[in-house]
Image (tube, helix red, strand yellow):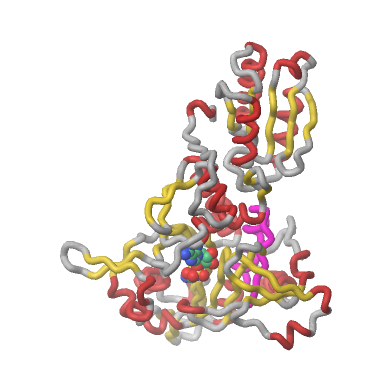
Amino acid sequence: MRLTRYFLPVLKENPAEAQIVSHRYMLRAGMIKQQAAGIYSWLPLGLRVLRRIEQIVNEEQERAGHIPLLMPTLQPADLWRESGRYDDYGQEMLRIKDRQDREMLYGPTNEEMITDIFRAHVSSYKDLPLTLYHIQWKFRDEMRPRFGVMRGREFLMKDGYNFDVDKAAALHAYNRHMVSYLRTYERMGLTAIPMRADSGPIGGDDTHEFLVLAATGESEVFFDSAVTELKLGNREVDYDNRDEVAAVCKEFTTLYARTDETHDQALFDAIPEDRRKVARGIEVGQIFYFGTKYSAAMGAMVTTAEGTKVPVEMGSHGIGVSRLLGAIIEASHDDKGIIWPEGVTPFPVGIVNLKQGDAAADAACEGLYKALQAKGLEALYDDRDERAGAKFATMDLIGLPWRITVGPRGLANGVVELTSRRTGVSEEMAPEAAVARIAEIYAGV
Ligand code: 5CA
C-alpha cells in the first residue's frame, strides 16, 4: 500500500475523551472513529488488524476441529422466552420491534439460537461431538461503555458452542477450547492467563476467564507469579486425545490464579510470599460448561447408544475479538505509539523514503516494495513528500514492527537501514538482504 493512496487519518493531538493509552493510540493512528457511545467505525488500518485477529481465531478453532457458521445479529424475542432469559437479561439487551410489531433483539450472545439450530437438525449421538462457532457483532447496552473498543456496546465476538452426549465429552470440549485459546492468544503476542471465574448470566458450574495483565484492566486478579512463565509454544497437541488435552489444561490451571469473584484468601496466603501477586487484568475470553441448562429448557434432545433420549450436554466459549485490539496495545506500546506483535500487525513492514523525488531513492523504494510483494508481504510505503521526522513519527505511532529506511546517502554505499520498532536497533544492509530478513521473520508467523 502506498501511503499517498491510502486512508490513514492520523491525529496530531491527543483526543481529550480517551482515558487509556490503547484508546488514545487507536484514535490517533486513525484506526477507529466513534459514531455513538460505545459504537465505532473501523477505519482501514483498524480493520486490517481486526481481520488479522479474526484469521488467527479461525485458524485455531478449525485446528481444534470446530466448525464455522454465521448466525444473524437480530434474533426473535420468542427464542429467548423459551430459555427464560428474555426477562432476565434486563436493560443490557437492545429490544426492537419490526413493522409487524414482532419483538426482536440485537443478540448479546447466541446460546438460544444455536440450540434452536441444533434441535432442528440433530437427534442422535452419532452426530456428536459437534462444536459450531461464529465471529459476529454483538450488542450489549452497557451502563458505562468506555475505553474505546475495550468496553463497547457493539463489539465483535467469537462465540462457540459444543454439543456432546455426556458430561465427560462436554468437559473434553471445554478443555479443547482452553488449549485452542492459549494458542490463539500466544500467536497474538499475548500472555493470557486462564483464571477461575464466575459464570454470570450465561450460567453453569465450570468457567474460566482469560486475562491479560495490564494496569488499566477492569478486573482485579490474584495469582501465583509462576503462572506468567507458562508457555504453550509450538508443541503439537492432539485435540482428539482427551488425556493429552486435559494434561495441558492441568498444567495451566494448577497454580493459583483467580479473579476477585472467586478469590480465596486462605489458598492465596499459601503461595510463597514473593510469588503472591495482586494486579489488574483485561478479560479477553471466557469458557463455560453449563450442561443441559439450554437444551433441557428448549427441548434439544439426542438418543444415546443405549436408546434413551437425553438433553444434549453443552458449553459456550467466547473471545473478545474487537476488545483484543485494545488489550494488545495496552500490553505492547511505548511513548511514541503502538508496537504491534508480528502476528497481528496491519502491515508487516513500513518503507520510509527519506527523499521522495530523488530518482535513486524512489527506484530503490519501488524495488523493495515489489520484491516484498513477490514474497506475499504487503509493505506500507510512505511515499509522501514529507520531512523524515514526520514520516518516522507516523511509522512509530502506527507501530509496524519493522521499518526499512531508504535515502540517497545510504544508497550511494549500496545499503538501506532495517529498524526494529520494539528495540529501536537499526542495521545497514543491501536492499535484497533486508527483503530476505523480513521474509525470514514472517515465515514463522
Ligand atoms: N456466550 C458466552 C461465551 S460465547 C459469552 O457471551 N461470554 S462473555 O460474556 O464472557 O463474552 C465473551 C468475551 O467477549 C469476553 O470475555 C470479552 O472479552 C468480550 N466482551 C464482553 N463484553 C464486551 C464489551 N462490552 N465490549 C467488548 N468486548 C466484550
Residue at 63% across, 13% down:
358
Q: Nearest the camera: 52 or 35? A: 35
Does any portion of residue 382 appear in the rendered image?
yes
The residue positioned farthest toward the top in the image shown: 359
Residue at 49% in and 31% down: 6
**Residue plotted at (65% across, 62% down):** 214
- The C terminus: image quadrant: top right
Locate the N terminus and report the quarter of the image it occupies: top right
- Closer to the camera, 397 or 417? 397
Please give left or right for residue 394 compared with residue 47 in the image.
Answer: right
Q: Is residue 354 above or below residue 65?
A: above
Q: Position of residue 170 (x, y in %)?
A: 56, 77
Number of numbered discs present?
0
Counting from the top left corner in percent of width and height, residue 202 is at: 47, 77
Q: Which percent across, then down, holds residue 45?
A: 52, 41
Farthest residue toward the left? 100
Magenta stretch?
175-196
Quarter of the view holding residue 272: bottom right
Q: Which residue occupies 33% across, 75% down?
A: 80
Q: Is residue 82 left or right of residue 130?
A: left
Up/down of 251 relative to 83, above or below = above
